[in-house]
Image (cartoon, coloured by chain):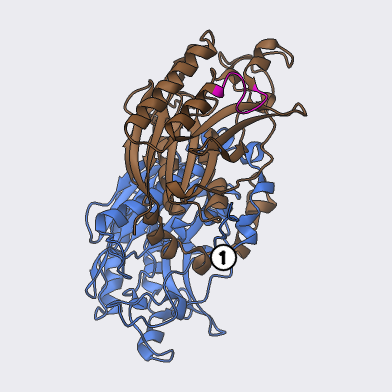
Chain colours: A blue, B brown
Amino acid sequence: MTRTLRLAGAQLGPIQRADSRAHTMERLIALLEGAAKQGAELVVFPELAFTTFFPRWWMAEDDPELLGYFEREMPGPQTKPLFEKAKALGVGFYIGYAELTPEGKRFNSAITVGPDGRILGKYRKIHLPGSKEFRPQQQYQQLEKRYFEYGDLGFPAFWGPKSWNAPILGMLVCNDRRWPEGWRVLGLQGVELVMVGYNSAAYDPNGGQAEDLELRTFHSTLAAQANAYMNACWAVAVAKAGVEDGAGLIGGSCIVDPNGRLVAQAQTLGDELILADVDFDACRQGKEKMFNFAAHRRPQWYKPIVERVGAVEPPLP
Amino acid sequence: MTRTLRLAGAQLGPIQRADSRAHTMERLIALLEGAAKQGAELVVFPELAFTTFFPRWWMAEDDPELLGYFEREMPGPQTKPLFEKAKALGVGFYIGYAELTPEGKRFNSAITVGPDGRILGKYRKIHLPGSKEFRPQQQYQQLEKRYFEYGDLGFPAFWGPKSWNAPILGMLVCNDRRWPEGWRVLGLQGVELVMVGYNSAAYDPNGGQAEDLELRTFHSTLAAQANAYMNACWAVAVAKAGVEDGAGLIGGSCIVDPNGRLVAQAQTLGDELILADVDFDACRQGKEKMFNFAAHRRPQWYKPIVERVGAVEPPLP
């Protein structure tokens, strides 16, 4: 028995601050059409895929530019063309966007849309990196903690449609992929495919020890590979890449199998599709044997994971 | 500032069921002396390093052969030569062994011994793989759940001595290294070096989808690399390798830096030393920035990790 889905990752090159929304929408639709032409049934776009990565800039809370980066509804007037095109093609998609709720709350969110245009699942990023404060020593800020609230939906897994062979799906956003807790909460719901969009700096914005494009791409790929293996699931992680507003972003978008092996990886820092035929039944070996959670986990010893936020050193000898 | 330690992994080739304890002790001491000659201050041996991996054989609970695999004290009459030699050389070590307590409890344990011969820390394996039952369809059993109780000491981190630059140390045993929960509990104690000994089958003993030596070595290395990265610590994972009593064991012993990069890896399936100069201050970049737990973790969303043992699928749509 095989339960397959043809999956695409749609890596984006940079979206400059000066680029129009209409121009970016043309690129998104071109990737969607290219993936559909190659038979993709589900296309995964990056985090904050409609605009530049605006948390690198300090703006006042009521700056019209800042408010212009947020979506008040999904689909909304500017995002509707993507929904319409995907539905016409019968292709589903994951996409990251900045969400402004009717109550005025702001989140770094992602949704998964089915081939019929219905929203199947929604996620709000939990592991916000960066700071609330302006850091004068930095050329580029990382102000996610200023512009977004921490996600308040947990890590909900959800079912994909029968036409995809009814997989259990989960979403993460960017920095979440480095935190094994989020993956494990999805794994504990039997997740078979974890989708992640990201914008990750190609260097260390805080200075400190040198971390370059190559090392940071390695970190990103390693996290996807190992967490897929340890939860016996597929993973797809998709970048916005290249030099955006003068700041470097890693690429390295990848599709990983439940053994943690790379099945596809982007080779450029621009708009690029990666594709794979994903067999959800390939998760069974891991879920039933090595990672049979019910048989092997010992939660009574995991309590510090929920009882402690930061590290506490052991008592001195 | 650098806080360095010269670290060795002492991979063992197979220990056959017919091998004498004295012969195995000669091999352990030869590895210890070889490491000391190359300046090692801490030598990490495998899991169950004094004997063959006896859980592959079904034995009665009171079989004298079974009881002969267990240590009633540490050091005991048969293990004392290793302690004496290490103390004479001023070298510390990690070693795995089968523990029989005065109360008659049996554990798959590991200890870390300081350069002065004092036991610095003790650990009892929590993630026992295998089964309690005989599986008639298998040529080799995996009876850890029969021969051992689940570890009852949690995942305690502890301090190494000042002569090692006072690192925070942690231990895991074999299958534990595939479970991010154990690493995270150590990470939440500020661990700077995680030591792991293992005996891992080079093929899938349950049949099922083919997993070979190469894939299983990849799994082992991947788990060490990613969990070291995600906890910003060093890791050393050391195998008993080769064909033991007719059953294949992977090698691939490795030392990994806090970026998840391989610093050293064994090339054979026999007795082999790997060495690295480990700088504990290299953990600081990760612990203070990307993996600053106090700044970025959100434990209120991690509750399923402790409230659930096995996976529970989401409700049908």
Most frequent secondary structure within the magenta stretch? loop
Write the residue at 35% across / 84% down: A58
Q: Position of residue B31 (x, y in %)?
A: 40, 24
Q: Where A198 sits versus A53, above or below?
A: above
Total marks shown come to 1
Q: Chain of mark 1?
A: B
Counting other residues with Cα less than 10 Å from the Cα at mark 1, is it few (<14), some (14-19), or many (20 or more)? Answer: many
The outermost residue toward the right is B103
In the rendered image, residue A166 lying in the magenta stretch gets the answer no
Q: Which residues are magenta?
A: B71-80
Where is mark 1, residue-wise? B298
Q: Amino acid at mark 1?
A: Arg
In this rendered view, identify the residue nearer to me: B88 or A265: B88
Name the image quarter holding the N terminus of chain B.
bottom left
In this rendered view, identify the residue nearer to me: A197 or A72: A197
Q: Quadrant of residue A212?
A: bottom left
In the picture, measured across the screen, residue A296 lies left or right of residue A142, that is: right
Write the residue at 66% across / 52% down: B306
